[in-house]
Image (cartoon, grey):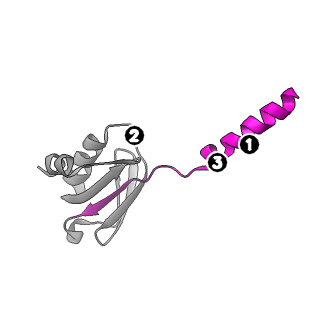
Amino acid sequence: MRALLIAAALFAAAPAIAQAPAPTRAVLADAAQATGRSVIDGATWRCEGQACTATGGTEQPATRACRRVVARLGAVTEFAWKGTVLSTEQLAVCNA
């Protein structure tokens, strides 16, 4: 009986374990700033036009990550760091 309960608990937890990592993405205000591939704070950013996505990266607040990306790639109109999406007000501070 105990083995059955453990198996049921593992089965129920499986979808949570199998989920993809939270998205990290940015939309640049000017696509001319995009360089194709950049590594910023351990995150590998790949840009196609204005749309950029990243994998990896250090644990840090989304606002700090945004400022670091803006310093290298230019102003952003949208930004999400490991699932945390910045608000309009946060984007304004990031781009300042």
Q: Position of residue 68 (x, y in %)?
A: 25, 47
* C-alpha separation, residue under disc 1 versus residue under disc 2: 31 Å
Q: Magenta stretch?
A: 1-28
Q: Residues within 10 Å of mark 3 (few under 14, many from 20)?
A: few
Q: Secondary structure at mark 1?
A: helix
Which residue ends up furthest to the top in the rendered image? 2
Q: In which quadrant will I find the N terminus?
A: top right
Residue topped by disc 1: 11
The amino acid at mark 1 is: Phe
The answer to whether 23 is drawn above or below residue 47 in the figure is above
> x%, y% of residue 76?
22, 58
Question: x%, y% of residue 91?
Answer: 20, 51
Q: Secondary structure at mark 3?
A: helix
Q: Which residue is mark 3?
A: 15
- Residue on which the image places disc 2: 58
Which class describes the residues within 10 Å of circle 1: few (<14), some (14-19), or many (20+)?
few
Instruction: Mark 1 or mark 2: name the one nearer the start of the chain.
Output: 1
Q: What type is the residue that disc 2 sits on?
A: Thr
Q: Residue at x 85, y 27 (%)?
A: 2
